[in-house]
Image (cartoon, coloured by chain):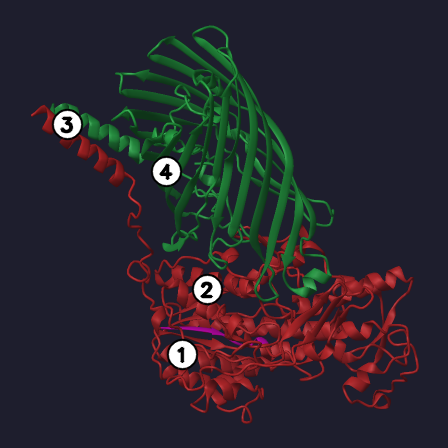
Chain colours: A green, B red
C-alpha cells in the first residue's frame, strides 16, 4: 500500500511539473458538459450535443432548448524581464460568452438542431506602460458561430451527424511603438471584422451495448479574413510624413480543427463515467499577419508557429435523486505555444482543469445546471524567447503564471 | 482502514496537484553588489567631463536625457541607483533642437526651457560633467564669468562651491571617470575654424592634462579616462557636404566657391565634398539652399558687414568669387588637418597619463571605437543587441539631433565600453547594458531616409550655432 501511495505521488509530481501553457479556444458550451470536465463527446444527450457531438441528438426525444452563459475570469502575471523579477499583472477582465442550443427529433431516425456559441475568444489587456507594451497592450478576439445540424440513426447502434457552421468574428489589437526622438510612444489600434466565414462539423455515436457509448466529433477549421482599419496616434511630425500606420488593413486567421474521441459508460444506474481525447490542430496558427492596404506601410508578420495539441478529459455524473444530478471532472490541456514564441497577448501554458457542478430539474419541463471550473496553468519560465520587447533583439524572457475561474449556468426547457 | 487510506491518498493527490503548480514560486533577482564589484565601488563614483559626460542631447541638457548619461548608466549597472546628477526639467536648458517636420525635414529650437531641479542638493554632484567646458576649466574655473569657456552651465552645476577638481576631491571617490578635451578641439572645428581660430595648443593641453592626472592619482581613486574621438567624422560635418555635392552634380554645376581658413575665396569641386576634403557644418544647410542666388542671409543673421570680407551679396551665393560660402560654414583641408593633428596630440597626452599610473589608471579608447563604427557605415552599420547603428545624421541612431552628441543608445554604447574596461582592469563583473532596451530607437523615423536638400528642408542655423560640447 505504501508503495502504491509513493507511486501516485511520483506520478502526480511528474504530471504537474509539466503543467505550464493553452490557445484561444473556448471549450465551455454548457454548464452540464463543463461540470463533467468537458468529456461529453460520447455522452451528448442534451441539446448542447449540437456542439459536442450532434450524432447524439438522435438519443433525445421531443424538442428541447438550452440557454446559458459561462462567466470566465482569467488571471495572469508576468515576472521579468530576466534578470529582473518585477511582477506585472494582466488587467482583470470578465467575459460572459453565451450559448444557445435547440434540438428536435423529427422521427426515430432523424433529428435536427441549431445553436449559437463562441468557440474561440481571447481577451487580454496589460497596463499601457508596462514593460511589454511594444508586444501587446490589448488583444480582443471573439468568434461567434451559428450551426444548424442534422443527425440520422443509421442502425440501432450507429448515429451520424453533419452540420454547417456560419461564423462572424471581430478582433482588436492595441500595441505601442517607440518613436524617439519624439517623446512618448506611438499607439496603434487595429480593429477588424469578418461577417461571413464558414465551416462544418461531423459526428458519430456508436452504442455497442446499452451501457456503453463511443463518440467521434469533428470541427473543421474556419478561415477568417478580417477587414478593418488601423489607427495610430503619435507625433504629428511622423504622421504628417506618413510614418504612422493608418488606414485599411486585412488579416487572416485560421482556427484549428478539432477531432474528439469519447467513451462513456454507465457504471450503474446512477453513475456515468466518460473520457475524451481531443486533438486540436493548432499548427494552423503559424503567423499573426496584418496587411496594410496602403503599400507605404510595412506589413506585420509575427510568427506564432503553434504546435498541434491535445486535451485529455475525464468526467463523471452521479444521480443523487430523480431530480438532482451532480457532476465532476478533470482535464489536462497541453500548451500549443512554443515557449520561444509565447507572447503576452496570450499567456499560455499547460493547463489543468477541475470542475464540479449540478443539474436540477425544477419542473417537469424546466431544468437548471450550474457548474464551476478552475483552470490552473502551470508556471512557465521562458528562457529562449524570440519575442523582442525592444527594437533590437532583447528577448522577452520571464515567468508567466495564469489561472482562471469559470462559472456556468444553463437553463433547459423542453416542449 | 482501507477507506481511511483512500481519504489520505485523495487529500495528498489534491494537495500535490495544487502545490505542484504553485502560482508564485520565488524567483531570484539580481543581487546588485556582492559578487560583482571587484576592486571598485560605484556607490562612491564621480565623473568629470563636458557635455558628453553630462548627458547633453540635441543641443540641450534635460532630465530625460541626463538619466541616460553614461556615468549614470555605469552606476546603475553597478547596482547603485543614487548617482547624483544636476537634473534640469524638460525641455532643458540650451535650446533643444526638435523636429518640426520629417518630410520635408525641418528642425527648430524649442522656445521654452526647463529649470534646474537639484540646485539645493546638499553635496557636490556625482556627475560633474559640465557642457561646454575645456580642459583648462577643470582645475581653474568656479564660475561662468571667470572661466575659459564661459559655459553658462558652470554656475548651474558647480554652484560656487569650487572647481570640478575640488568638488571631486572632497567626495573622496573610489572611482573617477574622466572624459575631457573634446571642446579643446571641437569648438574650433564646429565654428568652421573661425571662433576660436585654433585648438588649444598641444603643449598647453599636455601640461594641463598631466597636472590633472597627477592630482587625480593623488586621491588614490581608480581612474578611468576616455580619449577624444575624431571630431571631423561626426554627422555635424559629414551630412551637408555629400548632399550638396549631389545637388551640384545634378544641376550640372562644375563647382562652387568658398572662403578658405584665411578667408581667401577659393574654388571647390563636388568630389572634394563627397570625398571629405571639404566639410560643411550642419549650420550651412539653410544657407546652401540659397546656392546660385544672390544672398546675404549669412551676414544678416550674424550681424556682419559683408564688405569687410570683400563680399558682394548681390552676386550668386556660393557660385561667385565675390560671394563665396563663408569660412565659418566650412572646414577646408588645412583646418581638417589642424583638427586631426590636435586630436592626435591630445590623445597622446591622455595615453601618457594612463601609462604613468599603470595600476591606477585605465583607458577607454573611444577614438578607436568611433573609427570602427564609422568604418562600418559603408558595410551597413554596426549592430549592438540587434539594433543597427551608423553615424548617419538622425537616422543612424547614434547621434542626437545636434549631430554631435550621442543619443541615449549612443550613451549606452559608450557606457558599455567603460564597463568593459572597468571589469577588465579592476576585477569587477558588472553586466553590460542591453542597448536595445534603452530608448533611442528611431523605429518610425527610420522607415525613410532624411533628405536635407528637398524643397522646404530647413535646419534652423541658430539651433546648431549654439551647441555646447
Packing grade of label 1 (10 A; few <14, some 14-19, many >=20) is many
Percent x, y for residue B371? 60, 61
Any mark on residue B6, and which? 3
Q: CA distance from mark 2 to mark 4?
A: 41 Å
Q: Which residues are magenta?
A: B175-182
Packing grade of label 2 (10 A; few <14, some 14-19, many >=20) is many
Depicted B399 relative to depicted A165: above or below: below
Residue highlighted by disc 1: B216
Residues under numbered marks 3 and 1 in contact, where contact means CB atoms less than 8 Å apart: no
Any mark on residue A20, and which? 4
Q: Nearer the viewer's eye, disc 1 or disc 2?
A: 2
Percent x, y for residue A390? 53, 53
Residue highlighted by disc 2: B418
Report the side of B108 relative to A363 (left or right): right
Percent x, y for residue B140? 49, 89
- Asked if labels 4 and 1 share a chain, the reply is no
Amino acid at each position: 500500500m505504501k508503495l502504491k501511495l509513493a507511486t501516485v505521488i511520483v506520478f502526480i509530481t511528474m504530471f504537474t511539473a509539466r503543467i505550464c501553457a493553452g490557445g484561444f479556444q473556448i471549450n465551455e458550451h454548457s454548464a452540464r458538459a463543463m461540470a463533467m470536465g468537458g468529456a461529453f463527446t460520447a455522452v451528448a444527450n442534451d441539446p448542447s450535443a449540437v456542439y459536442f457531438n450532434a450524432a447524439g441528438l438522435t438519443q433525445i426525444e421531443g424538442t428541447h432548448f438550452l440557454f446559458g452563459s459561462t462567466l470566465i475570469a482569467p488571471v495572469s502575471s508576468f515576472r521579468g524581464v530576466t534578470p529582473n523579477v518585477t511582477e506585472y499583472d494582466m488587467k482583470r477582465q470578465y467575459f460572459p460568452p453565451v450559448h444557445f442550443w435547440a434540438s428536435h427529433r423529427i422521427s426515430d431516425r432523424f433529428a435536427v438542431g441549431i445553436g449559437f456559441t463562441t468557440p474561440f475568444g481571447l481577451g487580454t489587456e496589460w497596463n499601457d506602460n508596462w514593460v511589454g507594451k511594444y508586444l501587446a497592450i490589448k488583444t480582443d478576439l471573439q468568434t461567434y458561430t451559428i450551426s444548424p445540424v442534422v443527425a440520422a440513426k443509421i442502425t440501432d447502434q450507429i448515429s451520424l451527424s453533419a452540420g454547417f457552421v456560419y461564423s462572424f468574428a471581430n478582433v482588436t489589437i492595441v500595441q505601442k511603438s517607440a518613436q524617439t526622438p519624439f517623446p512618448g510612444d506611438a499607439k496603434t489600434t487595429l480593429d477588424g471584422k469578418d461577417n461571413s466565414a464558414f465551416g462544418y462539423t461531423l459526428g458519430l455515436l456508436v452504442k455497442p451495448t446499452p451501457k456503453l457509448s463511443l463518440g467521434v466529433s469533428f470541427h473543421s477549421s474556419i478561415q477568417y479574413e478580417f477587414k478593418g482599419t488601423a489607427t495610430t496616434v503619435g507625433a504629428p511630425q511622423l504622421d504628417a510624413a506618413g510614418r504612422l500606420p493608418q488606414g485599411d488593413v486585412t488579416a487572416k486567421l485560421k482556427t484549428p480543427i478539432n477531432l474528439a474521441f469519447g467513451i462513456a459508460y454507465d457504471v450503474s444506474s446512477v453513475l456515468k463515467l466518460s473520457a475524451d481525447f481531443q486533438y486540436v490542430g493548432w499548427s494552423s496558427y503559424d503567423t499573426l499577419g496584418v496587411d496594410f492596404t496602403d503599400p507605404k506601410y510595412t506589413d506585420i508578420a509575427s510568427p506564432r508557429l503553434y504546435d498541434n495539441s491535445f486535451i485529455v478529459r475525464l468526467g463523471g455524473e452521479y444521480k443523487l435523486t430523480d431530480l438532482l444530478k451532480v457532476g465532476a471532472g478533470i482535464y489536462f490541456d497541453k500548451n500549443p505555444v512554443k515557449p520561444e514564441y509565447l507572447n503576452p497577448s496570450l499567456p499560455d501554458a499547460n493547463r489543468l482543469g477541475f470542475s464540479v457542478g449540478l443539474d436540477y430539474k425544477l419542473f417537469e419541463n424546466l431544468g437548471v445546471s450550474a457548474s464551476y471550473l478552475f483552470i490552473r496553468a502551470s508556471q512557465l519560465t521562458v528562457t529562449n524567447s524570440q519575442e523582442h520587447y525592444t527594437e533590437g533583439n532583447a528577448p522577452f524572457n520571464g515567468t508567466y503564471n495564469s489561472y482562471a475561474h469559470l462559472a456556468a449556468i444553463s437553463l433547459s426547457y423542453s416542449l | 482502514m482501507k477507506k481511511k487510506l483512500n481519504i489520505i491518498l485523495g487529500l495528498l493527490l489534491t494537495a500535490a496537484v495544487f502545490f505542484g503548480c504553485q502560482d508564485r514560486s520565488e524567483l531570484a533577482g539580481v543581487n546588485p553588489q556582492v559578487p560583482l564589484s571587484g576592486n571598485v565601488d560605484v556607490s562612491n563614483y564621480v565623473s568629470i567631463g563636458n557635455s558628453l559626460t553630462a548627458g547633453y542631447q540635441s543641443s540641450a541638457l534635460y532630465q530625460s536625457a541626463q538619466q541616460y548619461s553614461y556615468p549614470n548608466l555605469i552606476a546603475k549597472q553597478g547596482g547603485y541607483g543614487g548617482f547624483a546628477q544636476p537634473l534640469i526639467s524638460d525641455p532643458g536648458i540650451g535650446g533643444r533642437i526638435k523636429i518640426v517636420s520629417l518630410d520635408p525635414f525641418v528642425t527648430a529650437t524649442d522656445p521654452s526651457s526647463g529649470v534646474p531641479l537639484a540646485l539645493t542638493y546638499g553635496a557636490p554632484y556625482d556627475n560633474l560633467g559640465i557642457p561646454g567646458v575645456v580642459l583648462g576649466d577643470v582645475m581653474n574655473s568656479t564660475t561662468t564669468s571667470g572661466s575659459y569657456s564661459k559655459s553658462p552651465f558652470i554656475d548651474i552645476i558647480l554652484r560656487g562651491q569650487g572647481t570640478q577638481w575640488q568638488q571631486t576631491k572632497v567626495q573622496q571617490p573610489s572611482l573617477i571617470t574622466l572624459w575631457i578635451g573634446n571642446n579643446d578641439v571641437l569648438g574650433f572645428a564646429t565654428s568652421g575654424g573661425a571662433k576660436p581660430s585654433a585648438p588649444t595648443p598641444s603643449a598647453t593641453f599636455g601640461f594641463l592634462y598631466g597636472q590633472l592626472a597627477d592630482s587625480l592619482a593623488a586621491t588614490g581613486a581608480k581612474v578611468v579616462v576616455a580619449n577624444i574621438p575624431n571630431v571631423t567624422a561626426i554627422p555635424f560635418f559629414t551630412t551637408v557636404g555629400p548632399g550638396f555635392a549631389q545637388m551640384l552634380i545634378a544641376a550640372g554645376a562644375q563647382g562652387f566657391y568658398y572662403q578658405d581658413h584665411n578667408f581667401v575665396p577659393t574654388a571647390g569641386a563636388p568630389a572634394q565634398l563627397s570625398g571629405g576634403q571639404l566639410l560643411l557644418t550642419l549650420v550651412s544647410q539653410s544657407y546652401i539652399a540659397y546656392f546660385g542666388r544672390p544672398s546675404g542671409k549669412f551676414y544678416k543673421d550674424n550681424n556682419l558687414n559683408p564688405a569687410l570680407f570683400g563680399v558682394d551679396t548681390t552676386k550668386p551665393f556660393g557660385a561667385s568669387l565675390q560671394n563665396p560660402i563663408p569660412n565659418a560654414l566650412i572646414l577646408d583641408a588645412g583646418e581638417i588637418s589642424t583638427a586631426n593633428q590636435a586630436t592626435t596630440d591630445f590623445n597622446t597626452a591622455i595615453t601618457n597619463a594612463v601609462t604613468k599610473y599603470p595600476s591606477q589608471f585605465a583607458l577607454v579608447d573611444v577614438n578607436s571605437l568611433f573609427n570602427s563604427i564609422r568604418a562600418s557605415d559603408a558595410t551597413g552599420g554596426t549592430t549592438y543587441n540587434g539594433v543597427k547603428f551608423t553615424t548617419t545624421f538622425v537616422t543612424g541612431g547614434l547621434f542626437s539631433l545636434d549631430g554631435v552628441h550621442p543619443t541615449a543608445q549612443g550613451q549606452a554604447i559608450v557606457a558599455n565600453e567603460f564597463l568593459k574596461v572597468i571589469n577588465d582592469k579592476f576585477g569587477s563583473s558588472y553586466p553590460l547594458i542591453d542597448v536595445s532596451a534603452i530608448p533611442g530607437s528611431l523605429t518610425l523615423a527610420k522607415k525613410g531616409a532624411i533628405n536635407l536638400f528637398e524643397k522646404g528642408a530647413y535646419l534652423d542655423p541658430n539651433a546648431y550655432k549654439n551647441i555646447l560640447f
